[in-house]
Image: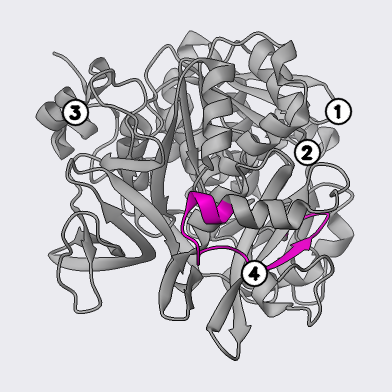
Amino acid sequence: MAKLTDFTSYADAQTHFSRDALWELFDGTRAAMNIAHECIDRHAAGRGTALSIAHADGSSEVLSFQDVATASSRFAYWLQARGVQPGERIAVMLEPSAAFYTAMFGAMKAGAVAVPMFTLFGPDGIRLRADDCKPTLLLTNAEKAPEARYDSGPEVIVADETFLQNLTQFADSFPCNTAGDDLAVLQYTSGTTRELPDAVRHTHRSIMTLMIAALYATGIRPGDRFFCPSSPAWGHGLWHGTLAPLALGVQTGTFSGKFNAVRLVQALEEFRITNLSAAATHYRMIRNCGRAEEFTYQIEKLSFTGEPIDSETAAYVEQLFGTKVCSMYGTTEIGVILANYPGAKDLEVRDGSLGKPVPGVRVEVHGPDGQQLPPGETGELVVLRRGEWFPTKDLGRVDADGYFYHAGRADDVIISAGWTMSAVEIENAILKHPAVAEAAAIGVPDATRGQIVRAYIVPKGEPESGLAKDIQELVRSSLARHEYPRQIEFVSSLPKTPAGKVNRKALRDALRPSPAGAAD
């Protein structure tokens, strides 16, 4: 009997998809399920490669499904020996490595709740999250351990080679016994360390729902060699980049350490990657690294998330890899709802489009009155959940053929002299200039117009005289005569959220009265 993984076309996705068909991809049931079993243990017999890790220092680490199954089982027994009970939180603040996957999957095997934490958090960021979820243990490396220790905080364990070696005293196989609705992962959305983001609660059954994004947003199929450089501390890196491919028995690659675009493209060649899913920022860094053309690729499917990708980068990526990069759109809270169906030869990938709804999901564009807007008009993207329309807090539009387009966050709209402008569209226009590496646009107060556009631009090299004027004219000619940055500031870098998105809120919060390099 055919499974959903046997179909690749858009038409087949609409015809054959059902919730019951999703369950056929797993061993577990609605009543009894365990993520570690679905992602690791059931694939261990074949001893195939589970994880290919590209370390920033140039080294590589390859782990088989059997490697991870054995080590995580030992860790589960270790937790039990320490008296850890099901439901207790185990925080894991490690870069992708044998220790990271041992702890994450071992915690879930034991019925504990895994809490991945970003390795670049300082003491305040660590404490905010630990005080919120109250983990019994926090595993990290020797360098971060002093920052993680504080009075009334969790016990800190240094998960080094010695720690892993000590686990060998425990048995190699652990019987998973969790319910589908037992809590498996607590994941904090990206945000500043001064304002604690909400922790999203994922049950073991969440792995089933995740497959919708895996099949239609990243296009994962058995036989792929997958890679996602996003940190597993965040939703894309953990759920789409790690758990989804592993649940299908697919080899997945990841990046460990400080990101470097040249090391990434080296890894794509080394691991013979056929399916890459990354943040838009990663693709821009590949474009700007200057060495991507030196390597040979076997890429068949590409996807991106996090924020819109500018048209110049999208065109470059298509030329480099020989296929279009496909958008996947959603949030940690609602999951992926729009996609371009990578690998579906019967669906056009339209430039700048978020794609179409994934199977079983209904998306519309609504106006301020809550009514559906006609094609071409910009409003808020909403998704139907349990009979009610759930707001995404993102603006967008849909065309006559059902393709959706992003128009920025609701709070990134700039209204100047009565004109409504999208920060995303302005940034996309700026990035067409060959001297621009990165750009961010925000609205700033103006006595006459209410707001004007200020652009922060990272140039390629030292900005030449007249560059600001050239950029303004380029935006005028691309969008509209009124829709251009009246103020431009050249900067060495842009603030980013921990997940790699440009942090426009940080720019708004740190306005400077007299920006250097401004042009009126």
Earlier residue among tags 4 and 3: 3
The residue located at (80%, 73%) in the rendering is 515
Amino acid under label 1?
Asp
The answer to which of 418 and 180 lies nearer the viewer is 418
Find residue 491 and report its horizontal and vertical position in percent: 81, 58
- Residue that numbered label 3 is attached to: 13
Earlier residue among tags 1 and 4: 1
Q: Is 487 part of what is drawn in magenta?
A: yes
Closer mark to the observer between disc 1 and disc 3:
3
Q: Which residues are magenta?
A: 475-494
The residue located at (29%, 29%) in the rendering is 26
- Residue that numbered label 4 is attached to: 486
Whether tag 4 and tag 3 are in contact, CB under 8 A, the answer is no
Earlier residue among tags 1 and 2: 1
**Image quadrant occupied by the N terminus:** top left
Closer mark to the observer between disc 4 and disc 3:
4
Find residue 319 and report its horizontal and vertical position in percent: 55, 19
- Residue that numbered label 1 is attached to: 57
Q: Within 10 Å of the Cα at label 1, are there few (<14), some (14-19), or many (20+) other Cα atoms?
A: few
Whether tag 1 and tag 2 are in contact, CB under 8 A, the answer is yes
Q: What separation in Å lies between label 1 and label 3 (alpha carbons)?
A: 41 Å
Find residue 37 and report its horizontal and vertical position in percent: 43, 32
Left or right, 516 with respect to 25, comes to right
Question: Secondary structure under badge 4?
Answer: loop
Earlier residue among tags 4 and 2: 2
The answer to which of 368 and 50 lies nearer the viewer is 368
Q: What separation in Å lies between label 1 and label 4 (alpha carbons)?
A: 43 Å
